[in-house]
Structure formats: C-alpha cells, structure tokens
C-alpha cells in the first residue's frame, strides 16, 4: 500500500490487483486485463508509479506495466529477482529483495547497500544491550 495523500491511496496484491481510491469514496479496481502476476509493493518515484511484482520492477502509467529500466545488473540477482518492497524517499528509490539485499536507484543507476554480515546471521539476537548499573 502507498498513501500518496488522504485522497489518493494505492494498493496492490495477488492476481494483478491494483486498487486506487480512499476511505471516503471507496476504491476502484484499475487492474488491467491479462495481468495475473502477484504484485508486492507500490510507490511513487519522481512523479511515476513503480510496482514490484513477484519477479521484477515495473513502471505503472495508470493502465499498463512496463519494465523499469535500467534493470538491476543480472549478475546481482542471477536473473531471478525476488522483490519484496520498493519505497521512494526523496529522489532515491529503495529496492528490497528477499535474496539479494537492498539496492538504491537514483533514476540512472543502481547501487548496492552493503549489509554487515552479522546482521544476516540466522541466530542474530539483536545488538548488545548496555549492562545494568
């Protein structure tokens, strides 16, 4: 879900569902025929909507999805992206992938954000707390 304003709320979901509207007037299904992908996340980046499906990132013009280009370097995800979420903050798009980490996009190029290995450990138990006095 992406809240553009109190009057403009976007939501995406399974089988290509794209909803647009608000609590006061309800939501319209603006999905397009033939789209049966699982859509995971939506955000607005530089005046354009970006949607993460279960296999790629797309621009959404209000009617159709088109590939977001430039695509991530294929060597990063071995041609199998696993998008989880996209979120724009200012002029930067953040891309979270379940297998390939976090990347940013400035509109021209992708940059990987390195995550410290200890944060990726399965048995990570949080940061060490301060000792009681």
Image (cartoon, helix red, strand yellow):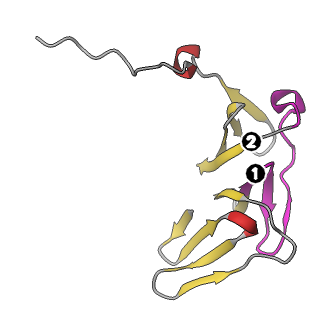
- For label 2, count other residues whose C-alpha is less than 10 Å away and answer few (under 14), some (14-19) or many (20+): some
Whole-percent x, y for residue 94 in the image: 64, 42
Helix, strand or loop at label 2? It is loop
* Residue drawn at point x = 86 percent, y = 42 percent: 71
Q: Is residue 116 magenta?
A: no
- Relative to 72, is 119 above or below? above
In the picture, measured across the screen, residue 23 lies left or right of residue 44, that is left
Whole-percent x, y for residue 110 in the image: 77, 35
- Relative to 109, is 85 above or below? below
Identify the residue at the far front of this view.
Answer: 123
- Relative to 126, is 26 above or below? below
Q: Pointer 1: what residue?
A: 54
Helix, strand or loop at label 1? It is loop
Residue 99 image-quadrant placement:
top right
Q: Which residues are magenta?
A: 51-79
Q: Pointer 2: what residue?
A: 82
Q: How many angstroms separate mark 2 from mark 1 (CA)?
A: 6 Å
- Asked whether the residues under the numbered discs 2 and 1 touch, taking CB atoms below 8 Å apart as contact, a structural biologist would say yes
- For label 1, count other residues whose C-alpha is less than 10 Å away and answer few (under 14), some (14-19) or many (20+): some
Whole-percent x, y for residue 115 in the image: 60, 22
- The dot on residue 78 is none
Residue 108 image-quadrant placement:
top right
* Residue drawn at point x = 65 percent, y = 49 percent: 86
- Relative to 82, is 118 above or below? above
* Residue drawn at point x = 61 percent, y = 49 percent: 87
Whole-percent x, y for residue 62 in the image: 76, 74
Q: Of label 2 and label 1, which has the lower sequence position?
A: 1
């Amino acid at each position: 879900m992406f809240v553009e304003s109190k009057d403009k709320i976007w939501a995406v979901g399974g089988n290509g569902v794209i909803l647009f509207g608000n609590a006061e007037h309800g939501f319209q299904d603006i999905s397009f025929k033939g789209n049966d992908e699982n859509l995971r996340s939506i955000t607005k980046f530089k005046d354009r909507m970006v949607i993460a499906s279960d296999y790629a990132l797309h621009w959404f013009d209000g009617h159709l999805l088109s590939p977001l280009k430039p695509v991530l370097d294929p060597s990063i995800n071995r041609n199998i992206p696993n998008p989880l979420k996209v979120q724009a903050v200012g002029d930067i798009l953040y891309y979270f992938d379940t297998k390939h980490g976090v990347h940013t996009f400035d509109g021209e190029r992708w940059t990987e954000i390195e995550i410290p290995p200890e944060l990726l450990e399965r048995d990570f138990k949080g940061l060490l707390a301060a000792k009681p006095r």
